[in-house]
Amino acid sequence: MKINWFKYAAPLNFYSLAGKVIPFFWVAAIALTAFGLYWGFFKTPDSLENGMKEYYRIIFVHLGSVWMAMWLYIMMVFWALVGLVFNTKLSYMMASATSITGALLTVVALATGAIWGKTSWGTWWDWDPKLTTFLILLFIYIGYIALQSAIDDTRRSDKASAVLALVGLALVPVIYSAVNCPDPTQCSSLHQESSMKNIEPNIMRGIIFTTLGFWMYSFAAILMRVRNIILQRERNTTWVSKLKEVN
Amino acid sequence: MLNVFWLLLKRDLLLALRRRSEIFTVLFFFLVVISLFPLGVGTEDKTLKQIAPGVVWIAALLASTLALDRLFSSDFSDGTLEQLALAPQSLSIMVLAKMVAHWLLTGLPLVLISPLVGLFYHLPNDSMVVMMLVLLIGTPILSMIGAIGAALTLGLRGGGVLVSLLVLPFYLPVMVYGSGAIASSMLEGLSLQPYFLLLGAFALLAIVFSPWATAAALKISLE
């Protein structure tokens, strides 16, 4: 059997496919997040061994948004790269739709981090490596969105922002190591080291389910945004003019 | 290949030397920013020494982003850039020549004038030497990363502000290690070698990748 890999690269086919799967992603997003939050709030210990009390429960929102914000940047670069290599219009639309959700989740990550920081470190903001890198990540997302909206010609704006996203991916690790260790002769930071291995299993379950929920939300939101972008960019085609939601 | 490099370098330098005032604008901008800080923050000896490394670098970053506009825009508006892109020689080499010319005209003057900053901020002589050295390694990186941003925003309305938004976050590692080296040089017994190694590594990385990325970006902008 010959599989046509590029069938859904056509905006026409993808538009209807996305329309069909979006409800499922929304259901999954709500169910997984609700379950994760329920588990996180009611099935986990009230205080941790390292002295953290009830307030540590913001971790269920914090980690989910942190992971998704980083993952979406990688996905954005992936679609940008696919666009540059195969020159498919839809990949650029995916990249541009991903950037907005990614920027949004970066803001959520920073905000929940600030609230957690206020309760556990006693300060809203600290120039800690992870916080600073996330701020820079937000700036890069904003730069990507700004560049894309500054160029009127869609072909050029797609490709230019794709190059920017790639440069960003190459430089983020360098930036992270620079802020992680501004003095190369000695390194230290407030943020605890990643302690995923010895985490309490119930907390871990909450984290995993909310993260999966956020992931499903990202799918739903990005696909909805891609549908909008498709309608905007293909508005002069006949298939769009025949859609019943347009008329 | 080298022929094109030298030819373009000479041409860019010659063009710039015919309009010398542009070189001095960047230089004076740098000096103005440098001299505003003590008046805003305070002029005690200790404060000055503490803020000097950061201030020098922030002024250098701002001066270098302001000058980025000049890198391609005049060649773009009179069509020279399109002719260069059509030439059989590699565009990356030509871009590298333009970067080097740009650094000689905007980065090198900052390096040469930086001892004056040392005087303004009461820096010891050793730190002044370190400052000149890190600027010498660091400012080319700024020109090279900035060139990518300049190529991406070529010919856009409000491109000047946009290019700062795009490239300033990427300048961060250079600033962190550059100012870190100056700050450590004022303390006793700290080795400065790691800073120079890291800056040097970053410079090499930029030389390898940025002409290539800039050429790709230029081709997109010229389409």
Image: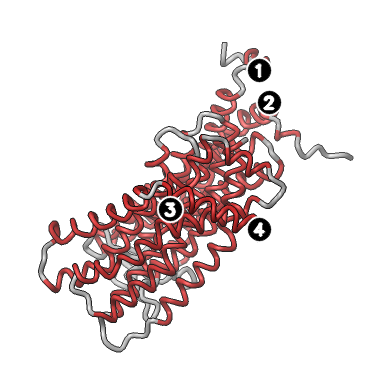
From mark 4 to mark 1, how far is it between C-alphas?
Answer: 50 Å
Provide residue A232's location: percent of width, then percent of height. Answer: 55, 23
Badge 4 vs badge 1, beta-carbon distance below 8 Å: no
For disc 4, the marked residue is B3
For disc 1, the marked residue is A237
Residue B190, relative to residue B6: is it above or below? Answer: below
Q: Is residue A80 left or right of residue B48?
A: right
Q: For residue A12, which numbered disc appears in the image?
A: 2
Could you tell me the amino acid type at mark 4? Asn
Labels 1 and 3: the sequence-earlier one: 3
- Secondary structure, mark 2, is helix
Could you tell me the amino acid type at mark 3? Leu
For disc 3, the marked residue is A137
Could you tell me the amino acid type at mark 1? Thr
Provide residue B24's location: percent of width, then percent of height. Answer: 32, 53
Q: Which tag is nearer the camera, tag 2 or tag 1?
A: 1
- Secondary structure, mark 3, is helix
Q: Nearer the viewer, residue B83 or B220?
A: B83
Q: Is residue B143 left or right of residue A42?
A: right
User: In the rendered image, is residue A30 in sight?
Assistant: no
Looking at the rendering, in which quadrant would you find the N terminus of chain B? bottom right
Badge 1 vs badge 3, beta-carbon distance below 8 Å: no
Q: Nearer the viewer, residue A83 or B106?
A: B106
- Secondary structure, mark 4, is helix
From mark 4 to mark 3, how far is it between C-alphas?
Answer: 41 Å
Label 1 resides on the chain identified as A
- Secondary structure, mark 1, is loop
